[in-house]
Amino acid sequence: MIDRSELLRVPVFADLPDDQLAWFISQCQEQLLKPGDTYIRQGDPAENMFVILEGEFQARGEINGETFAFPLKSGEVTGVLPFSRMKRTPVTGRALSNGRLLRFPSAQFPQLVQKMPELTTRLVGLMSDRIRETTRVEQQRDRLASLGKLSAGLAHELNNPASAAKRATGQLRQILKKIKDASHELGRRELTPAQKAEIENLEASFTQRDEPPPDALIASDIEEQIDSLLRSHGQNDLWQLSADLARRGVKSAAFESLFANLDADTARAALIRLAASVEIANLLNEIESSTSRISDLVLAIKEYTFMDQAPVQNVDIIKSLENTLTILNHKLKHGVIVKRDYQRVPLLVNSFGSELSQVWTNLIDNAVDAMDGNGELRVRTYREDPCVVVEIGDNGPGISPEVKPHIFEPFFTTKGVGQGTGLGLDTVQRIVKKHRGSIHVSSEPGNTRFQVWLPLAENPS
């Protein structure tokens, strides 16, 4: 039989009266375990509270498709606690060493509340601590999962322009050899100043063109005209040159003077040089565009995270939204049309900028998921003194009336196992409340809208 002094060594039982301890012991069943023995199994009815007297134990379970384990040792209380809503045991508990524990049946909780009010208060506090720790772990897991998705998307977004720039530089090396050979060929010929000037003027006009490239059908017609002109002058093997010039929108009439003023071999060398110059201009534009895209993404990341900035500052809401849309471009570009409706006035909120970025990320990510990656995302901002209102909507199927009352509850999710923790909207609501704001939702098929109301900065400037 267990001695009351053993129970007093358990922190939640410290200083409790002997008669209460005696009653508690009388309601318990003592259990001896060897290494590997199981005292509870995941999925079993939650019918017992356990007081660990001796030994080391481990609880192991699964949440949202992810396995977790945590140690238990003598002096701890586990299992179902008073006022808990637990119906099924979420973990499997095993002994890691020889051990002893007490089983207290949950059916006796009503009597426990009456006979041991101080213990009840301590156990409720223990349950609150357990909930806070579980929530903290889940929020951390949710943040890591979100970070993982963002990182994967950004890696893809950065890889595309980086690959394009690398490919262009490789092609540039080949084209530079071609233009070098053509220049040597022209250098061996005795060109008049007028002929040199004509070639240089043509080269400048081709490489400095600001017009957008023609569409495929028009480019095909131009290519045929250039190829026909070249063949008429005996140049039957310059079809690739015709295609390169046509993509740049250079028309055949521009070359007629070359054949009129130069012999066939000199005109050929001049054409190869001109086409190479055009290709170099195209590749340089591609490299510039790709590196600019990389630079824009890096800047968006810095502004999204508010790296190297004060943690609390006046945040431009529109800029914050645009940075988030840039970061989430990998989810938007394959079927989501973004419709913006911004009120063009300073909409500054004194806030933790990176936390607001998290709000927009969760709301936009949920909207895209609700539309299954195809639909219309609506982002709107307007002023409603003394607040700025940010509205993020979608034309997905909507939120059912049964689900809507629960969407802000911690751990509530409509996604499949392993796809969501149910903390996204809970996190959003906590951040919005932290900024003295509020969030509202309205939903019907084809029109779901989340409205975030945030107080404007007192002295926007």
Image: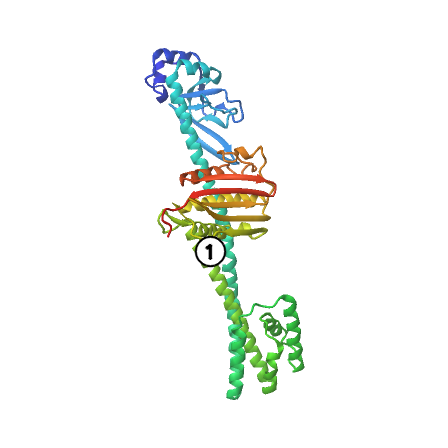
Q: How many marks?
A: 1
Q: Which residue is drawn at 43% across and 15% down?
A: 112
Residue 168 appears at what percent x and percent y? 52, 65
| Residue 11 or residue 436, whichever sits in front | 436
Residue 419 seen in the figure: no
Q: Residue at x 54, y 86 (%)?
A: 195
Q: Which residue is drawn at 56% across and 44% down?
A: 369
Q: Quadrant of residue 404?
A: top right
The type of residue carrying mark 1 is Leu
Quadrant of image for the N terminus: top left
Residue 167 seen in the figure: yes
Q: Dot 1 surroundings within 10 Å: few (below 14), some, or many (20 or more)?
A: some
| Above or below: residue 98 compared with residue 4 | below
Residue 129 appears at what percent x and percent y? 40, 29
Q: Quadrant of residue 356?
A: top left
Is 58 on the left or on the right of 234, as rendered?
left
Residue 417 appears at what percent x and percent y? 55, 36
Residue 114 appears at what percent x and percent y? 42, 14
Q: Residue at x 48, y 39 (%)?
A: 439
Judged from this view, the residue extending furthest toward the front is: 385
Provide the residue designation for mark 1: 297
| Residue 330 or residue 359, whichever sits in front | 359
SS label for mark 1: helix
User: Which scheme is used to colour this image of the protein?
Assistant: rainbow
